[in-house]
Amino acid sequence: MQKNASKIKIALYLLIALVLLPLALVEYLGVTGSSLSTPKATLAELLGGNASTIHAWRPANYAEDQHIEIGLDSPRVGILDESIAFRRVLPEGLTRDAAEWSVRRTLGSLDASRFDYLSFWVRGEPSTATPLALEITFTLADSNKPAKTIEGHSFALGLGGEWKQVLVPLAKVEGIDDWHRLTGINIKVIAGSTRTSPVNVFWIDEMALLHADDDEEEGAVVTLARLPDVGIPETAEEHRARLKQRLVGWPKRLQIDPASLPNDDAGLLHRLAADTWRGIDELTDRETGLPLDRIQFAAEGSDVDQAWIGDYTNITNIGFYFLSLVAANELGLIPRESAIEKIKATLTSLENVETSHGFFFNYYNTTTLARTDDLVSFVDSSWLTSGLIVARQAFPEIADRASRLIAQGDFQYFYDPAKGLMSHGNNARLGQQLKIYYGVFYTEARLGSLIGIGKGDLPEKQWFQTARTMPPELTWQQQVPVDYKEQQAMGFTWLTGHYHWHDRDYVPSWGGSMFEALMPLLVMDEVKYAPNNLGKNDITHTQLQRIHAMDDLHYPIWGMSPSSTADGQGYTEYGVPKLGVGGYKAGAVTPHAAVLALMTDPVEATKNIRRLIKDYPVYGEYGLYDAVDPFTRQVGRNYLCLDQAMILVALANHLKDHAVQKYFAQDPIIQRTLPLLKIEKF
């Protein structure tokens, strides 16, 4: 998941070849993380020369009133060659009239017919609130008429200040059928994203052509073959106005005075739940019943209309929308009949969108219901299924419809029996399973394994085929594992071990983030059903998150997990490095991590939430914003559907006696898996 989601469930892969293991254990890094896998065919390698050469790049639109500088800059990953920076210099006072500008990479006559994707990494200026949007134009020589030029176009939209991979599926580039003579690639900053504040700099790194069996990365921006059915891209104002008209509601103010909130703990948490639910509900398309992935408000000021709105959603968001409706009904925030009607509307949309092998694609447009990529994701499919499971238990009135959607997909679709691992997903267009796997046990992907086993799609042994820790010989990991050995019980065999830190033993996640540890706990009560392994580990991870932030880093608040950056312009992974095999960096505190801790350490979590609200301008009309810098007090004023829904579901479990968890556990699919949770001891 994206995070599974959202996240935009927006995620990348870190591919690690573990030659000392009989299994290829690879774990998910996240949306903007670094990768140790490099493209198999860089343009420089195909053409000769250094990968960072800038000499083949030229300004594509020469104008007397502007100048484009092209130079080398720091690489995306330190071990690689430099990135290329493109800077457009304008005369004083010239802005809107020169919004579009282009650069071109000449290729001679390159045979690209054996490749499937153009891949490159790109980022914009972190300090600007203007999203970066690019038009990619391919120029080819006509094989039949050498003097004739053929052009095809693609677009990459919604880029920001964090590095993102762009994957352009060559087969989807309209107007080009023959890729034998690729002569150039033109990259243009398009006016649709720059009417209010022009983009004057962006960076590119690691441009390559990829084969379908190369290591694709889930966090990549899979570009659209064309823009929507408009000849000219919408301005930001037009786009925002069109989307707002379709929403259930919109906030009237950006900031809530903490002094106006209840003084008692239960009252405060219930108010937070009510405000959070209002945001999830109102930021939903009233016609399709699909929740928007996110909204992003300006970093400063109080104008609620200065916001970026994404007209897309991830299927993890949809699963959590179902969970949110159940949670809101349990909390008395929405009548049962209204919750059922909303679920029915969303089910109708799901019943009418394109699927593959019974599973849903990872992203859909919230207004048209069109899918926007080729990926069918294992972990996101798991979270959608979780939402359907809880919904059918809470509301028998929609059980038949939910059950049909659950039954139509077989999780064998994601399973590699030779490795015993779950693939990150499948490229439906190419009909190929991604050769990247969930190899670490203690991540959010563990829930998908349980669901697949409970449905009868996966063998029970799959639960034991992921690594509790890496082998001690792999010195790149955060710690050398203790007591690494083979164990057997109940006919199952697995490799076990643990880390030790701050006088505590624990099984690590991949990145050391709160959502990897506690996201499955939102539906599966691991503290109750797996007290000697997962439940114990959940509590220990929570304690170490608090100890590291408060004692080691001297943070006044705690809770780190992938989230928006504190400036609100990016999204990245945060965590406690020592809690993970790979380990994310420490950074911003995210409220969803703080609230998740209610399920494992309610007393300390409540104190932390109170400090967060009292000392930081983090509370808006829809509840807590997505990220806080604990020292500068800067707040990323974004609402992400997944993060807000995790807050709401955690609050419902805390305030209403494990309400959502109980619905999940009573489902026949989950009942069949509960004995597995009692076998192992950490």
Image (tube, grey):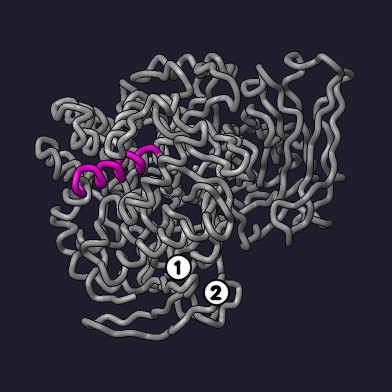
User: Earlier along the polypeptide chain: callout 2 or callout 1?
Assistant: 2
Q: Residue at x 26, y 51 (%)?
A: 523
Please report the bounds of the magenta region as a residue range: 644-658
Q: CA distance from mark 2 to mark 1?
A: 10 Å
Whether residue 9 is visible: yes
User: Is the magenta region chiefly helix, strand or loop?
Assistant: helix
Asked whether the beta carbons under mark 2 and mark 1 sit within 8 Å of each other, the answer is yes
Near mark 1 (Cα within 10 A), the count class, few <14, some 14-19 or many ≥20, is many
Whole-percent x and y of residue 356?
A: 34, 46
Between 384 and 528, which is closer to the camera in this rendering?
528
Q: Taking the image as drawn, is residue 24 in sight?
A: no
Is 582 part of what is drawn in magenta? no
User: Residue 626 placed where, x, y %?
Assistant: 48, 38
Q: In front: 266, or 373?
A: 266
Query: Picture quarter containing residue 539?
Result: bottom left
Residue 176 quadrant: top right
Residue visible at 71% across and 36% down?
139
* Residue appearing at x 75%, y 14% in the figure: 97
Disc 2 designates what residue? Answer: 479
Position of 169 compared to 147: left or right?
Answer: left
Dot 2 amino acid type = Gln
Name the spot of residue 156 as percent of width and height, x first: 60, 35
> Alpha-carbon neighbours of circle 2 within 10 Å: few (<14), some, or many (≥20)?
many
Could you say whether the residue bearing mark 1 is in a helix, strand or loop?
loop
Q: Is residue 651 magenta?
A: yes
Dot 2: element: loop
**Above or below, 351 relative to 236:** below
- Return the residue at label 1: 508
- Residue 276 picture location, percent across and down: 35, 32
Residue furthest right in the image: 64
